Image: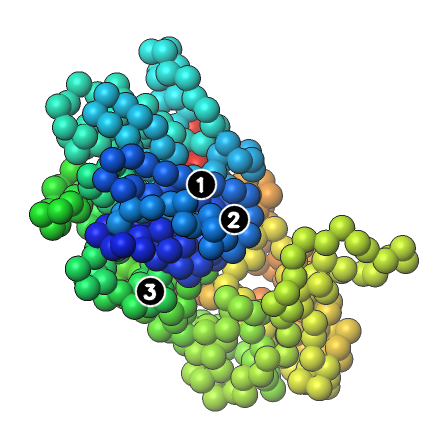
Amino acid sequence: MCGIAGVFGHPEAAKLTYLALHALQHRGQESAGIVSSDGTRLYGHRAMGHVAEAFSEERLTKLPGDSALGHVRYSTAGDSSLRNCGPFWVDHALGPIAVAHNGNLTNAETLRRTLEEEGAIFQSTTDSEAFLHLIARSREVTTVERIREALKRVEGAYSLIFLTDRFLVAARDPYGFRPLVLGRLRDAWVVASETCAFDLIEATFEREVAPGEIVVIDANGVRSLQSQPAREARCVFEHIYFSRPDSVVFGKNVYTVRNQLGRELAREQPAKADVVVPVPDSGVPAAIGYAAELGLPFEMGLIRSHYVGRTFIEPSQSIRHFGVKLKLNAARSVIEGKRIVVVDDSIVRGTTSRKIVKMIRQAGATEVHLRISAPPTTGPCFYGIDTPTKRELIASSHSVDEIRDYLGVDTLGYLSLDGVLRAAGAADGRGFCHACFSGDYPVGVRAQGGG
């Protein structure tokens, strides 16, 4: 999973892109990069770490021009190293070009093998670089047409921003797996993964980049090309977990959808309890909705530390559940002597949930009822979210009762897929990808890639 942003027509394009990436930091914490254009050439910088670590005021002054694009990365394929940081940029026959990519190409390995047989030399192990090789090899006479041709050769999920010395291009796959939005800042145009990036730089949201659409932004304004027919399969997990709750994604406010997920969960899986406690932060809106629907008190019974980074220092004497305790601590005053409903967005392997349940019991809960605002996760995602392999997913090999016993809860309840789709505004079940729950993959999976 990654976050991407682009600015065209603003004298402080690199700075605005930097701020947009700040707002999108939740989509990738591994590395950050920005490429800018002054109308004659491209300038770029990439580094490992968060946006604030990768860029300084001095570094941003070395990215001149009135257009820029940026990328924050959370790897879904390819190793975690500087060579896989985005954006990627090259010079080719028609001039310089850079690309920032969010998603996974399902034909990445086949495509890479074909390109290498044709003489391509890859500098990274991520599939994002394949777009540049396809563009360089195209015989189309314009860069836009080369991009259009390249997109017809790839399969899977892609939200893309391309930057040249003269224009910026945004493109989205025909299924619309990952979000991509278009906005305006006075005379400048902006593109980003989520609308929260627009809020920070005070840009106005114009519209989504449509599935299968190519948007070209240059000195003459904005024009739209339909690259391929739309076959919408938007990732429902963007609403459940990944997107920021203050964003509008796929036409819906994320917080509102998550709150509604909690209300649907309360109707399907009520519990007799004294208080509702979320697993912060992603479980909070659903827990608020769950509590409101059942008329139960909502309390922050788990307190999250917002200053946790990686630590290699542990006490010499073993502390149980040390990793989880670095991030969360149970508030005994909220929990002790009470029947607790814990609301979370998902259970993946189950190991973290098990530790949280033990922590809550140690804080004095008389009962623990776990409610999940999504169905059991039974399959991996091949379209841009870093989920474990199928055998590592506890729900792929264990029943709900078995998972309940493993976690040590009194009851366990998941939201149905129908409930999720109702909350997301798709009661007819159409327009969303839910393969990680249903096993219904919209695009055949030959080999994973990773933006």
Q: What residue appears at the point 43 percent right and 21 percent down from the top-left corner?
A: 122
Question: Residue 246: horizontal and vertical position, in percent?
Answer: 38, 69
Label 1 is placed on what type of residue? His
Question: Residue 419: horizontal and vertical position, in percent?
Answer: 37, 66
Q: Nearer the viewer, mark 3 or mark 1?
A: 1
Give the residue pinned by disc 2.
54
Name the one closer to the observer, 213 or 367. 213
Is mark 1 in CB contact (under 8 Å) with mark 2?
A: yes
* Secondary element at image label 1: strand
Pick the quarter of the image with the C terminus.
top left
N-terminal label among 3 and 2: 2
N-terminal label among 1 and 2: 1
Is mark 3 in CB contact (under 8 Å) with mark 2?
A: no
Compared with 221, 264 (above or below) is: below
Label 3 is placed on what type of residue? Ile
Question: Is residue 371 visible in the rendered structure shown here?
Answer: no
Q: Identify the image quadrant of residue 212.
A: top left
Q: What residue appears at the point 46 percent right and 72 percent down from the top-left corner?
A: 286
Q: CA distance from mark 1 to mark 2?
A: 8 Å
Describe residue 298's horizontal placement relative to residue 37 as left or right.
right
Name the one closer to the observer, 18 or 272. 18
Q: Which mark is residue 45?
A: 1
Describe residue 422's horizontal placement relative to residue 216 as left or right.
right
Give the residue pinned by disc 3.
201
Q: Which mark is residue 118?
A: none
Q: What residue appears at the point 50 percent right and 53 percent down from the top-left corner?
A: 56
Label 2 is placed on what type of residue? Ala
Compared with 273, 24 (above or below) is: above
